[in-house]
Amino acid sequence: MLLTGLTSAAVAGLVILLVSSTTHASSAEPTNYKGVKREFWLFNDHVSGLNDTKVGLPADKFSIPSITVKKGDTVVIHFYNIEEKGGDNHSFTINEKPYNNINAIVHPSTNQTITFTATSTGVFPYICTFHQPSMRGQLIVEPATADEVAVQQQ
């Protein structure tokens, strides 16, 4: 009975040690990550063969449906509206904090560069405010991995 009590106490102590060291390591990794510049070239695109009027949805979409970066990265998005002059405006808009100040409206046959630092992890939808609900994507901000931190420290 005494041996069982000691074994349980030893296992509990080991679990606490492992949990606290794992928690400490994972919370330290993102603060040690210096971030890198990640560039993306984004275009408006069109779903070919989709009749907007018949379906009741715009046939517009983003050329990149998902952008993945690390917390601390500088994100540079070169957004091109490839429609001919006289065509539709498009936007790259994020409505969720902390990125809710991003709202770039791009006129036909022009482009705009959007630059920001990824400061919070999570999944943040981006939309074109002119072509909902079809023109949307997601910004995925992940924490840096231990390997990415180690590479920067070399």
Image (cartoon, rainbow, N blue to C red):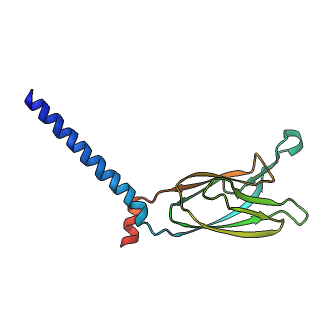
Measuring from the top left, give residue 13's x and y in whole percent. 20, 43
Viewed as shown, does residue 138 lie left or right of 58?
A: left
Measuring from the top left, give residue 36's x and y in whole percent. 51, 69
Q: What is the residue that sits farthest to the left in this orientation?
A: 2
Q: What is the residue that sits farthest to the right in this orientation?
A: 86
Measuring from the top left, give residue 64's x and y in whole percent. 66, 56
Q: Using the image, determine if residue 58 lies above or below residue 109.
A: above
Q: What is the residue that sits farthest to the bottom in this orientation?
A: 154
**Residue sitting at 79 percent across and 59 percent down?**
90
Q: Quadrant of residue 98?
A: bottom right
Query: In front here: 140 or 11?
Result: 11
Q: Quadrant of residue 67?
A: bottom right
Viewed as shown, does residue 99 lie left or right of 69?
A: right
Viewed as shown, does residue 129 lie left or right of 143?
A: right
Query: In front here: 130 or 56?
Result: 130
Measuring from the top left, give residue 46's x and y in whole percent. 79, 53
Quadrant for the C terminus, please: bottom left
Q: Using the image, determine if residue 151 lies above or below residue 60.
A: below
**Residue sitting at 25 percent across and 42 percent down?**
15
Q: Quadrant of residue 101?
A: bottom right
Quadrant for the N terminus, please: top left
**Residue sitting at 37 percent across and 60 percent down?**
28
**Residue sitting at 53 percent across and 66 percent down?**
73
Tally the numbered discs. Answer: 0
